[in-house]
Image (tube, rainbow, N blue to C red):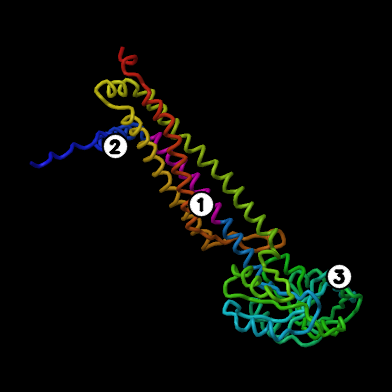
């Protein structure tokens, strides 16, 4: 004998009814609903735009920094000459795109006074690299060619450093290094990375020039450019595991900067997210008014058999519809603003913000996070009036 088909559970049957009631409620308060959706949309739009601009700022600053900085520096514990064994390991490592020996020093750069021009002076970090050093850095042309063809006694200055010293291409500048030795260098050209901190402090000369000035044939170590900059820590750990070298990945060199940028993004995201929270409580306000207005209708529904769960679903569905509408519109507006700033980047003063333009970078993880938080917030806001409606006692109201 065949078994009878079980009847659907009450929870399944009540969903269509809950949807019908929620839809009917929303149609009666269109103006308030539209304003609520717009409030959520503005908050989501601001959050997406703020996070995208922050991502772009961070990415642009890191890219500008790495143009004149290696991804990884490997320095010897004791000054020594070139290391053939380490160079073989670097050539055999598929993660290494290019490498070069280097010698670093700090010094005081001056330009003597001339007729009508006062003397110029500034401190600099000077790197001595061979011609192959141009493959480790990502300078633009013709700056890369100038670095690759530097001759002994020539120097390539950062753009802000050149302005501070007042030195132009072809002029001579004097260098007093950290060991109190002096030399005269000819300015071959000027490079610009877009990062003011580097452009105002760095200068490049040939390895032989700096070795002759320090009266040594040793090198500080090796600078590396990697195919993936994010692997710098792992590559440095592998290369120095059994060697008398210390690794300095770019993440450690600019660790403070990266931490500040990460903190900046979190603070901006939290502050702007408060707009979404305020807008979400607009849903709670709309639904609370609906509960007061429809108290008798809710009581009648309870009297004819509607459960607390059904009433809760009705108001949660209303909050969900309003929240999804605000999220959808906010995503469209936020992506539209991001697209606009992608085509027309916001210009910045480079000496204040280190980069000259503010690009945009939209990340899928940010979009998922914004929408998840927005949806959860709107549902929590809708839960307050939903529980209030579900707790209405039909006997007391009808009486």
Image quarter hosting the C terminus: top left
Provide residue 51's location: percent of width, then percent of height. 55, 53
Provide residue 98's location: percent of width, then percent of height. 63, 80
Provide residue 292's location: percent of width, then percent of height. 39, 23
| The residue stretch that appears in magenta | 31-52
Please tell me whether residue 293 is drawn above or below residue 216 in the rendered image.
above
Provide residue 342's location: percent of width, then percent of height. 52, 62
Q: Name the residue under label 3.
A: 121
Which residue occupies 44% across, 30% down? Answer: 384
SS for dot 1: helix
SS for dot 2: helix
Q: Is residue 323 visible?
A: yes
CA gap, disc 2 to disc 3?
75 Å
Query: Which numbered disc, 1 or 3, marks the residue that appears first in the sequence?
Result: 1
Image quarter hosting the N terminus: top left
Q: Is residue 142 visible?
A: no
- Which one is closest to the eye, mark 2 or mark 3? 2
Q: Mark 1 points at which residue?
A: 48
CA gap, disc 1 to disc 3?
45 Å
Residue 123, by quadrant, is bottom right
Query: Which numbered disc, 2 or 1, marks the residue that appears first in the sequence?
Result: 2
- Which one is closest to the eye, mark 1 or mark 3? 1
Q: Mark 2 points at which residue?
A: 19
Please tell me whether residue 325 is drawn above or below residue 21 in the rendered image.
below
* Residue 354 on the magenta segment: no
Q: Do the residues labelled 1 and 3 touch (CB within 8 Å)?
A: no
What is the crowding at mark 1: few (fewer than 14 residues within 10 Å), some, or many (at least 20)? many
- Which one is closest to the eye, mark 2 or mark 1? 2
């Amino acid at each position: 004998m065949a078994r009878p088909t079980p009847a659907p559970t009450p929870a399944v049957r009540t969903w269509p009814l809950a949807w019908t009631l929620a839809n009917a409620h929303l149609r009666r308060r269109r103006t308030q609903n539209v304003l609520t959706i717009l409030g959520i949309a503005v908050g989501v739009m601001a959050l997406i735009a703020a996070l995208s601009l922050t991502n772009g700022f961070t990415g642009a600053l890191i890219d500008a920094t790495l143009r004149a900085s290696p991804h990884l520096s490997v320095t010897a514990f004791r000054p020594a000459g070139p290391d053939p064994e380490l160079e073989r390991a670097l050539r055999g490592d598929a993660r290494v795109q290019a490498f070069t020996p280097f010698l670093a020093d700090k010094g005081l750069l001056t330009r003597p006074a001339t007729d009508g021009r006062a003397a110029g002076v500034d401190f600099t970090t000077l790197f001595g690299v061979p011609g192959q050093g141009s493959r480790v850095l990502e300078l633009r042309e013709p700056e890369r060619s100038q670095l690759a063809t530097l001759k002994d006694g020539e120097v390539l200055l950062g753009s802000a450093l050149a302005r501070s010293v007042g030195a132009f291409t072809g002029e001579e500048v004097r260098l007093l290094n950290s060991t109190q030795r002096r030399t005269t260098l000819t300015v071959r050209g000027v490079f610009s990375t877009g990062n003011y901190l580097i452009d105002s402090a760095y200068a490049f000369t040939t390895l032989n020039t700096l070795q002759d000035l320090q009266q040594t044939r040793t090198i500080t170590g090796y600078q590396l450019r990697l195919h993936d900059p994010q692997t710098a820590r792992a590559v440095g750990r592998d290369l120095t595991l059994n060697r008398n070298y210390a690794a300095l990945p770019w993440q450690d060199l600019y660790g403070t900067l990266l931490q500040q940028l990460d903190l900046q993004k979190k603070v901006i995201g939290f502050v702007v997210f408060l707009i979404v929270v305020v807008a979400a409580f607009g849903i709670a306000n709309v639904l609370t008014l609906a509960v007061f207005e429809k108290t008798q209708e809710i009581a009648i529904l309870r009297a004819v058999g509607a459960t607390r769960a059904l009433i809760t679903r009705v108001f949660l569905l209303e909050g969900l519809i309003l929240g999804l509408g605000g999220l959808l519109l906010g995503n469209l507006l936020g992506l539209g603003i991001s697209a606009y700033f992608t085509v027309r980047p916001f210009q910045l003063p480079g000496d204040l913000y280190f980069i000259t333009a503010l690009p945009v970078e939209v990340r899928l993880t940010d979009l998922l996070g914004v929408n998840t938080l927005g949806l959860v917030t709107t549902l929590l806001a809708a839960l307050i009036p939903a529980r209030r409606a579900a707790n209405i006692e039909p006997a007391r109201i009808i009486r």
